[in-house]
């Protein structure tokens, strides 16, 4: 449900009208005139303003790209020895963040599950497997399908809300973007996500409609990198290179 809203100093003030939201501001805030006017969707936590650069989601999202794999050409490879070390370093770095209130999600593809499992073993946080976080199968031809097996027996400590194998078809760029937006809408307010390059690129662009998202892509998103979205701010914590 969209409501009139004002964004000021890191908080969103909503009302049945912008005038009502304005009256909820402190006198100092009203006099400062340093607020952004827009609309807030309480079901998706999305803040939309007249100026595109002021669009953001009122969420904290930590995007982790899976660690290095043993076979980059394989559609669903496992982690390499270096990748496991990278994942351990990511897990250690997350200890420095206040992650008690965060939900953990992972793509169902093996490289992400193995990366997420290292996080689970280090941090002890339950991880939900989310099919919509899978990489788009760009290697498929029209009418081909790709099966991602259900690996509940291999990762029994994860939260699995489905029991069948997943069948993916070739996606257009528009379909992939729409899927990413659906994921972004449904994410809890505080979430750590283990996923893929394409999802991270799309999610940063959709969550932040300014140049910062494009700069992330330009700099690259290497394996085991951590991208942190906090409302309208984007921070790249870099990659973790194992010795």
Image: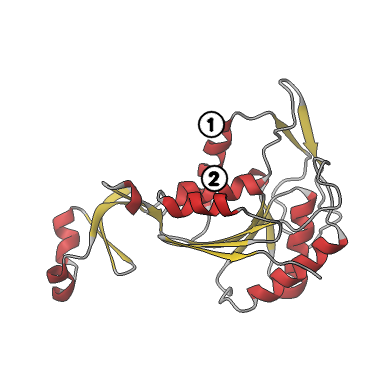
Judging from the image, what secondary structure is the residue with disc 2 in? helix
Label 1 neighbourhood size at 10 Å, few (<14), some (14-19), many (20+)?
A: few
Residue 132 vertical position relative to residue 145 in the rendered view, above or below: below
Residue 38 vertical position relative to residue 165 in the rendered view, above or below: below
Q: Nearer the viewer, residue 180 or 236?
A: 236
What residue appears at the point 74 percent right and 32 percent down from the top-left corner? Answer: 139
Q: Nearer the viewer, residue 46 or 97?
A: 97
Identify the image's colour scheme: rainbow, by chain, secondary structure or one colour. Answer: secondary structure
Q: Position of residue 52 (x, y in %)?
A: 33, 46
Residue at numbered disc 1: 174
What residue appears at the point 18 percent right and 53 percent down from the top-left corner? Answer: 17
N-term-proximal mark, 2 vs 1: 1
Q: Nearer the viewer, residue 232 or 105?
A: 232
Judging from the image, what secondary structure is the residue with disc 1 in? helix
Q: Position of residue 1 (x, y in %)?
A: 34, 47
- Residue at the far bottom: name it: 96
Residue 216: quadrant of the picture = bottom right
What residue appears at the point 77 percent right and 45 percent down from the top-left corner? Answer: 163
In the image, 92: left or right of 80?
Answer: left
Label 2 neighbourhood size at 10 Å, few (<14), some (14-19), many (20+)?
A: many
* Tag shown at residue 47: none
Work out whether residue 4 can be spotted.
no
Work out whether residue 126 can be spotted.
yes
Counting the numbered discs, the total is: 2
Residue at numbered disc 2: 202
- Residue at the far front: name it: 219
Q: Position of residue 6 (x, y in %)?
A: 25, 59
In the image, 53: left or right of 133?
Answer: left
Cα distance, mark 2 to mark 1?
11 Å
């Amino acid at each position: 449900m969209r409501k009139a809203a004002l964004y000021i100093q890191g908080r969103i003030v909503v009302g049945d009208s912008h005038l009502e939201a304005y009256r909820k501001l402190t006198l100092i805030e009203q006099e400062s005139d340093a607020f952004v006017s827009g609309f807030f969707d309480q079901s998706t936590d999305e803040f939309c303003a007249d100026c595109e650069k002021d669009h953001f989601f009122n969420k904290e999202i930590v995007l982790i790209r899976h660690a290095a794999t043993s076979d980059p050409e394989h559609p669903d490879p496992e982690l390499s020895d270096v990748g496991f070390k990278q994942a351990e370093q990511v897990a250690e770095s997350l200890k420095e963040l206040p992650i008690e209130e965060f939900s953990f999600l992972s793509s169902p593809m093996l490289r992400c599950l193995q990366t997420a499992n290292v996080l689970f073993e280090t941090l002890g946080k339950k991880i939900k497997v989310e099919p919509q976080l899978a990489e788009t199968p760009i290697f498929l031809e029209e009418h081909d399908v790709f099966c991602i097996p259900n690996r509940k027996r291999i990762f029994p400590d994860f939260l699995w809300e489905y029991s069948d194998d997943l069948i993916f078809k070739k996606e257009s760029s528009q379909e992939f973007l729409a899927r990413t937006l659906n994921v972004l809408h449904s994410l809890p307010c505080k979430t750590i996500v283990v996923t893929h390059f394409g999802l991270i690129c799309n999610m940063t662009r959709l969550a932040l409609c300014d140049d910062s998202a494009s700069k992330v892509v330009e700099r690259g998103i290497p394996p085991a990198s951590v991208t942190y979205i906090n409302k309208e701010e984007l921070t790249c914590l870099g990659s973790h290179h194992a010795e």
